[in-house]
Image (cartoon, coloured by chain):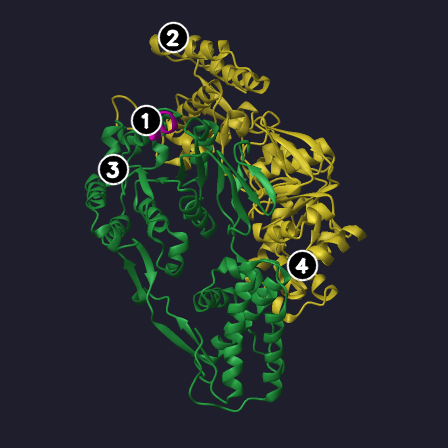
Chain colours: A yellow, B green
Amino acid sequence: MIRLAPAGQNMAKKKIAKTRKTVARSIGSAVSKKRDRETLAKIGTMGRSVVTSSLAMREPFVNIPMRSISNMRFNKRRRILEMGSNTQRRDLFNLGQSRKFMQTLLLADGCKQLVEAEKTLSLRGMYYMSLHTIAGTKEKTFDNQNESDPILEDLEVALGALREELHVFAKKAGTMVGTITIVDTGDEIDCRRMGSGGYSIPSIVEPEVIQFSKCEADFVLHVEKNTVWSRFNEDRFWEKHNCILTEGGGQPSRGLRRLLHRLHEELGLPIYCLLDCDPWGHYIYSVIKQGSIALAFESRRMAVPEAKFIGLRAADYERCELSDDVKIDLTDRDIARARQIAAYPWFKDRKDWQREIKRMLANGFKMEVESLITKDISYVTDVYTPQRLQAEDFLD
Amino acid sequence: MIRLAPAGQNMAKKKIAKTRKTVARSIGSAVSKKRDRETLAKIGTMGRSVVTSSLAMREPFVNIPMRSISNMRFNKRRRILEMGSNTQRRDLFNLGQSRKFMQTLLLADGCKQLVEAEKTLSLRGMYYMSLHTIAGTKEKTFDNQNESDPILEDLEVALGALREELHVFAKKAGTMVGTITIVDTGDEIDCRRMGSGGYSIPSIVEPEVIQFSKCEADFVLHVEKNTVWSRFNEDRFWEKHNCILTEGGGQPSRGLRRLLHRLHEELGLPIYCLLDCDPWGHYIYSVIKQGSIALAFESRRMAVPEAKFIGLRAADYERCELSDDVKIDLTDRDIARARQIAAYPWFKDRKDWQREIKRMLANGFKMEVESLITKDISYVTDVYTPQRLQAEDFLD
């Protein structure tokens, strides 16, 4: 990812020598895990390139793949969002780029320390870890976390290493129960015996942290909200229908998406999503299925192109004989958002999705999964979801 | 809580007969759990009073204890916020109150159905369950959830039954690990073997749902954010220091507060709070310790007046030799908020807290727990917290 710059400039030898030593130490350190060794090697390669070009009196720079919408494309065969091949040069000797260049190397060094220490840190923790005032100046390395987060994403794409591989995590969100036993950092967790609370899904769910040990489940049912999840758990839906039940607290976290991806890829489980009948529900489905624009570089390891949308459907208002009371008027913003989503490349050629969004717009209202409670407390678990599963009545 | 009104008015006999029958059924139903029987009895009493006054041709009304700040008082002996004895009449035959009167009975009936069905519902679920258009009119029972939530709180205080006893839950938030085994709805959960994810704390943690089966822990350490919690869990702080580790994702949920209260009251565990050095951290501590103004009626079952504040302290900037980089300027709002908190009746007479807030204001900056990462990734778990525990250096 790093290429040597043609032109050269003088640099203090002392600084170079120090950098070289750091790089050498990182390569020499004994890290037990294979993944960690690979990550350290990647960081080492980046560091070595900078040192090499510096020693050769050439301008050091790193190439950062572009994460803008112009560099995204929808891979029709794989049916996922992917990042294109455009990159952006980040030079040390360019006033507009040198700050970002140094921040990039600073965070790369922070990640190296983390991996070597076999510890993980939150995004905010990484900001603090790399925060200092540069000696002899009043210049801080970062003004705030809004400056360090995007640089970490740059590092991910530049190194080709997921944030999780760099030992950086975000707020965790989401819960799981069901007919599966997992091993989380050595602890065997039987998700059939997790009571009313459930297993809290961590932010990092890479195979080195979480292994699947015993799974009888036939599928995964993913719901949007933890209150709906509680209804399904209380009715022991996962036991009656032999499945895994997950929730993501709204917009699914990376940890949850990666877990769904792994459950699908490694255990071959179908993923069914039960979300609200509104643009927000459709968008959540889109992110789980194809990936998000902001994180397109990780779609291959996060997206589940085969995920199915089980409901709510715009037609459910009539099919389930719901009352007028459950209608929530679409706002102008909802309407604009729905049209945007209908125009997504992966929805554009799906007749069923075009019909679905058109019908919602014609209805003029949205509906929440909870609206099924107006039929009966457990209508969603006793009737709605089993019927859709039985009939294989999904949107794809 | 319900008193008969002196004056009477005519009511259709059919309606009264129906109400009577409903009340009779609720009293007659066989509910296995003692708590549920008590809750049903309370709802039954409320319903019967309304029926009795109606049959006697008197105006039916319910008395709702007032939840305004004017009806709160700080109980100096118990050191918790309590609700005073002021109540507000809610009449059926008063144009300004009849809507709320009917909503109150409607939700009481909904809770009765829930308890009888031995199911629980979210606040949003309750809204949907009680939502309908009144026959022959275009009037909805509730315009939105903002109308039903306060009525549910009214019901709690009027019945003297916690929301949890009415089988209503909120979004769950918070995670737990540590040297304790609990039983959650029949499932034994060993919190020593919960991996990196942890046990997700449910919204309802009443003794009928969660029992403590085996606990060796010496104390509970509660941290504000789940990212900080992950640091403590990864470093297996709870194992080294034989404790329980909880987090509440910011402002602690009712479920979490109730759980801390139970761990303290039933198992005699001290509760230590590690929160940010800012007005928000101080407020979270205040809520855990004394209760919140909005929910003062439940302080006796939620608050932990003996909870201790372990840090961060304003003096830590010097004590821990932190760099200028971790300072976050206090905003005008922070300053106003800090002064408000200093004037709380339960902080007013605490010299140590007055000193603490004064010092923070003199500093002119706030600090986050994560700022300790600038010392070392695990400074907070290896040095800071053990030192404070050892020295018993707390704010009370």
Question: Disc 4 versus disc 1: distance between alpha carbons?
Answer: 55 Å
What number is the disc on residue B314? 3
The kind of residue on which mark 3 rests is Ala
> For the residue labelled by badge 3, is the local secondary structure a helix, a strand or a loop?
loop
Can residue A368 be spotted in the picture?
no
Question: Disc 1 versus disc 2: distance between alpha carbons?
Answer: 22 Å
Mark 1 and mark 2 lie on one chain; the one further toward the N terminus is 2
Q: Nearer the viewer, mark 2 or mark 3?
A: 3
Q: Residues within 10 Å of mark 2 (few under 14, many from 20)?
A: few
The kind of residue on which mark 4 rests is Ser
> For the residue labelled by badge 4, is the local secondary structure a helix, a strand or a loop?
loop
Q: Nearer the viewer, mark 3 or mark 1?
A: 3
Q: Name the residue carrying label 4.
A: A378
Give yes or no for contact between labels 3 and 1 (Cβ–Cβ under 8 Å). Answer: no
Question: Disc 3 versus disc 4: distance between alpha carbons?
Answer: 51 Å
Q: In the image, B110: left or right of A119? A: right
Same-chain check, marks 4 and 1: yes
State the quadrant of the N terminus of chain B: bottom left
Q: Chain of mark 1?
A: A
Q: Name the residue carrying label 2.
A: A17
Question: Disc 2 versus disc 4: distance between alpha carbons?
Answer: 68 Å
State the quadrant of the C terminus of chain B: top left
Give yes or no for contact between labels 4 and 1 (Cβ–Cβ under 8 Å). Answer: no
Q: In the image, A207: left or right of B330? A: right
Where residue A9 appears, x then y in whole percent? 38, 13
Identity of the residue drawn at 45% across and 26% down: B235
The kind of residue on which mark 2 rests is Ala
Q: Magenta residues, as a range?
A: B380-386
What number is the disc on residue A105? none
Could you say which quadrant of the image residue A356 lies in?
bottom right
Give above or below for A211 relative to B44: above
What number is the disc on residue A132? 1
